[in-house]
Amino acid sequence: MSDTTTAGEERTAIAGPDGKFRCRWPGSDPLYLAYHDTEWGVPEYDSRALWEKLILDGFQAGLSWITILRKRDAFRAGFANFDPEAVARFGEADVQRLLADPGIIRHRGKIEGAIKSARAYLAISEREPFADFLWKHLDGRVLQNSFRTQGEVPTQTAISEAMAKELKTAGFTFCGPTIVYAFMEACGLVNDHLTGCFRWQECAALARDIKTAV
């Protein structure tokens, strides 16, 4: 398949320079391609890792994910490697420190929201693992979608709406249903690699392997 496809196939998977067919959204950026090929869509069951990604998706609001991806190391340094217990103790001095950090997105509302969300994470963790809090919306199983074109992929669903509502009730911020659905895709709660992408089958198989191992 070439990039000069018919109108009906414009958004299908496309072959890269290595001959592998991929989703189109990573383009040719090496960092984005590596993220697509190794992280995006891999089922994540670690509570802390899920919280980190949700917070970063909150910082993405109004921006592109590649912008956040390029700043991820700086975010990790600024936010104590996304240790919720450490972030929950952040005060105004930390907010000012982060607002002065050119390596991250310097947005007071999002910074304060991350601190608030760390405290919400700890409150949830007293009742149940954060991973369980999220995965229960899918009965602990990856939703394996079979979309051929990008146009078929939703931006939000009833599941992401319910998850967003519960997160907000728990005290999380910047977690609307569209952000939550993007988070679900990235963390493999749903498999939204296009069926023509080589990662679609790989992530589907990985979901089964991981699930039987936990």
Image (tube, helix red, strand yellow):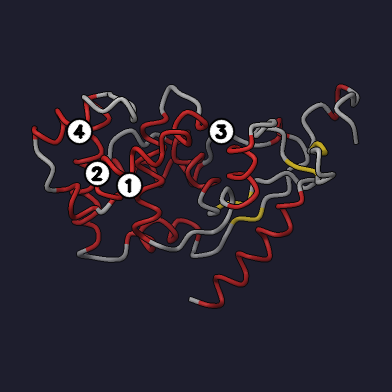
Q: Quadrant of the N terminus?
A: top right
Q: Which of marks 1 and 3 is in front?
A: 3
Residue 112, label in figure: 4
Pointer 3 with pointer 4, Cβ within 8 A: no
Residue 166, label in figure: 1
The label nearer to you, 4 versus 1, is 4
Distance from the alpha carbon under mark 4 to that under mark 1: 19 Å
Question: In screen coordinates, is 188 left or right of 99?
Answer: right
Q: Where is residue 69 in the image (x, y as percent from the top left)?
A: 48, 36
Pinpoint residue 105: horizontal percent, then vertical percent: 33, 27
Spot occupied by residue 73 in the image (x, y as percentages of width and height): 39, 42
**Local crowd size for mark 3, using a 10 Å CA cut-off: few (<14), some (14–19), many (≥20):** few
Extreme bottom residue here?
213
- Which label number is shown at residue 155? 3
Mark 1 residue element: helix
Going from N to C along the chain, the mark reached first, 3 or 4, is 4
Q: Name the residue under label 2.
A: 117
